[in-house]
Every structure is written in C-alpha cells, then in structure tokens.
C-alpha cells in the first residue's frame, strides 16, 4: 500500500512494535502487574531483535561473515554495567544513569568495531570469520581473567537491576531507535553503496565507492548496537558473566539473521523473536532429566524451518500460503475503488472525443499515372 510518498511496507515493523510497546507500556505504567517470566521474556526478545538487526547490517547488507557479535555485546555489557555500578551511589538507579551507561557501552563497542573493521578491509569470507571469532574469544577471556575489583573475574560483574516493570519499555524503545537508524541508512545512498560492495566489491570500487569508509561504517554501527544490547543485558540480569558471550551465542545470533533471510530486517525481527521464545519455552518445559533434549529439539526445529524456507519442492506451497497471499485474500482489490487514476479516459486530454467512431477510408493508389500500364 502506498499513500503519496508513504509506503506502508517500509514502516510496518515500526507500527507493530510501537503498538506493542504502547499497549504493554500503558498497562504497566497504570498499575497492571505482568508475570515476571513474561517481563523477562520481553526483555530477551528486545535484546535479540537489536542483536539480529545490527548483525544483519554486516552479514546481510555488507555481505561479510562476522562471528564476533557476542564479543561486542560482551564489551557493552561489562563496560556499561561497570559505569552503572559506579554511578548508582551518586545518581541513583534512574534514567540518567541508564543513559550514561548506554552511551559508555555503545561507545566502547563501537571502538572495538573500528579495531576489527580495519583488518576486515583486507579479509573476506572464512578469514574474516576467523578474525571476528578470535576477537570474541579474546574479549571473553580478558573479562573472565580480570580481577575481582575491576570486572568480577570468573564470578562475573554484579550490576544494578532496573525495575523489571519498566525496563522492557526502554528496551523496545531502543528497538525502534535501532530500526530507525539501520533502515534509514540502508534506504539512503550510503546503504546503496554498502549493498553495492556486497554485490561486487571490485565494480563498486571502480565506480568510485569508498569501500574503506563504508566497511568501517557498517562494522562500527553494528558493533555499537551490539553494545547497546549488552547494556540492556547487564540491566536485565544481576550478574554479567563472560561465559554467556561465547562462540555458541554468536552462532545463535547469526542463525537469527540467516533464518530470517539475508538482507531482510523484518525477517530478522521475526526470527529473533521466534528463536528467543523457542529457547525460553524449551528451557522451561524440559527440566530435570529432560534438559538434555533441549538442544536436540532446538536443532531439529531449526532444521525443519530452514528446509521449509528453502526447499524447491515446497515453493508452490510457500507462495500459496504466506502472509502476503493471506493479506491479498483478506483485502480484495476492487478496480471500482481506484480513485485519482491519472490514466482514466475521462481525465486524459485528447483532441477527439473517445465516444466517437473513427474510420479511415483507404483509396487504392493509381499506378497508371505517368503512362505506366
């Protein structure tokens, strides 16, 4: 649907998340008390969406394979959590402390993104994946072996817990900020330059695109929002432990991007919400001796989803039964409802009335002229 220059499909994610935040936020602010497990799930979903959308900028739009996103998140969680811990005695555990911690965590992660982005200018594919993977493991090891007075060492850093009835509101507001920055970047000339590098780096370079600039921009911006997710994680948990930000977590974030579709922001949002909900439910249902089945069932469900999304034999079924086809069935197109059609016959300026009958008389040419017979 297009209204003037406004395309609804470009803003559907803002609308859905905005309505969800407005409804749940209003209910929480007016005294409705949600279940703690639901509030914690909403916080985790918001964090996962920020991580997936920010990684999609590098993997989906820039076309580079990064396995160190959990490392950037780790930097944001520890640095932002440490700043919040130092400021709470002076400023209290309020919005100002949260904002300062957010800036510190995002800034520290962005600096790490620049550090990783510089060698990434000369690396591609598996080599870049190895470098980013090594970065994540180094960061995790540094915080794990830190002193107890600095970042808590192996026991982790104790961080202030924001009021759980309001933190999910701030988290989803940050989701909207993430979407606004990433989507506006992708739809601008800078975003077209980034996707041009993905499609053909040599051709982009030959056409005058500053490859160095845009690669650094993508890595830095992606890392900064991973740091934002890390600060939210530190506020959502009482303790930040480096073991959480390992290789497996980076793979999980990458799965969200791939499962949602490379270069699809809406797909990344849906996949992040689905995988987070799935992990939470499996951890809740499969307890005790059944806990060993959690990873097995999780992997099987992901395999089924990937096969459904990519199997050529199921293409007809996917085309027939999808959200777009369902929307077309619910909203049937009626040509009579079309208004302001500039191509209608009654508004197109013509010299001859369209209700006239036009005819052309064909007269045979006289070939006998000039004495020819």
Image (tube, helix red, strand yellow):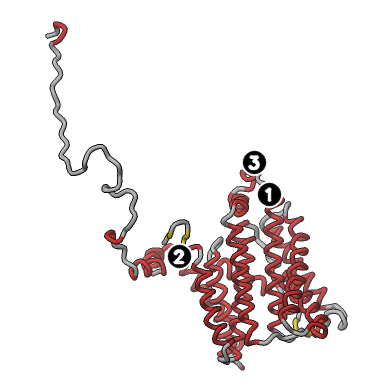
Report the residue at 32% width, 48% height from top: 343
Helix, strand or loop under label 2: loop
From the top left corner, tell me how far across and down residue 138 is, in percent.
Answer: 79, 69
Report the residue at 48% width, 69% height from top: 307
Query: Which label was assigned to residue 211?
Result: 1
Report the residue at 63% width, 56% height from top: 62
Which is closer to the viewer, label 3 or label 2? 3
Residue named by callout 2: 311
First along the sequence among labels 3 and 1: 3
From the top left corner, tell me how far across and down residue 64 is, in percent.
Answer: 65, 58
- Local packing at callout 1 (Cα closer than 10 Å; few below 14, some 14-19, many 20+) is some
* Farthest residue, direction top: 371
The residue closer to the viewer here, 331 or 342, is 342
Residue named by callout 3: 206
From the top left corner, tell me how far across and down residue 360 is, in percent.
Answer: 16, 31
3 and 1 marks in contact (CB < 8 Å): no
Q: Quadrant of the C terminus?
A: top left
One can see residue 279 in this view = yes
- Local packing at callout 2 (Cα closer than 10 Å; few below 14, some 14-19, many 20+) is few
Q: Disc 3 and disc 2: Cα gap in Å?
A: 37 Å
One can see residue 157 in this view = no
From the top left corner, tell me how far across and down residue 340 is, in percent.
Answer: 34, 55
């Amino acid at each position: 649907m297009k209204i003037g220059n406004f395309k609804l499909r470009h803003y559907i994610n803002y609308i859905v998340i905005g309505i969800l935040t407005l409804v749940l936020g209003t209910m929480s602010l007016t005294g409705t008390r949600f279940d703690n497990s639901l509030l914690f799930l909403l916080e985790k979903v918001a964090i996962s969406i920020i991580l997936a959308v920010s990684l999609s900028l590098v993997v989906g739009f820039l076309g580079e394979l990064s396995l160190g996103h959990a490392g950037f998140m780790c930097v944001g969680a520890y640095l932002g959590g440490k700043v919040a811990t130092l400021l709470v005695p002076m400023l209290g555990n309020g919005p100002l402390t949260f904002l300062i911690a957010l800036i510190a965590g995002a800034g520290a992660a962005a600096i790490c993104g620049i550090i990783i982005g510089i060698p990434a200018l000369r690396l591609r594919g598996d080599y870049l994946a190895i470098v980013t993977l090594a970065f994540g493991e180094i960061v995790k090891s540094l915080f794990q072996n830190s002193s107890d007075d600095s970042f808590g060492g192996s026991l982790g850093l104790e961080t202030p817990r924001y009021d759980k009835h309001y933190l999910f509101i701030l988290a989803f507001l940050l989701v909207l900020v993430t979407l606004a920055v990433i989507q506006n970047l992708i739809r601008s000339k800078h975003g077209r330059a980034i996707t041009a590098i993905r499609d053909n780096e040599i051709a982009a370079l030959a056409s005058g695109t500053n490859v160095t600039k845009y690669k650094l921009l993508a890595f830095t911006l992606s890392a900064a929002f991973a740091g934002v997710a890390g600060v939210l994680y530190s506020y959502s948990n009482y303790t930040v432990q480096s073991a959480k930000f390992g290789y497996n977590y980076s793979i999980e974030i990458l799965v969200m991007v791939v499962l949602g579709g490379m270069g699809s922001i809406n797909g990344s949002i849906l996949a992040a919400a689905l995988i987070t909900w799935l992990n939470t439910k499996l951890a809740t249902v499969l307890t005790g001796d059944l806990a060993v089945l959690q990873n097995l069932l999780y992997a099987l469900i992901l395999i089924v989803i990937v096969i459904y999304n990519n199997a050529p034999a199921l293409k007809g079924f996917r085309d027939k039964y999808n959200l777009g086809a369902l929307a077309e069935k619910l909203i049937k197109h009626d040509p009579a409802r079309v208004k302001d059609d500039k191509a209608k016959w009654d508004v197109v300026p013509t010299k001859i009335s369209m209700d006239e009958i036009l005819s052309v008389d064909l007269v045979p040419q006289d070939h006998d002229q000039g004495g020819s017979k």
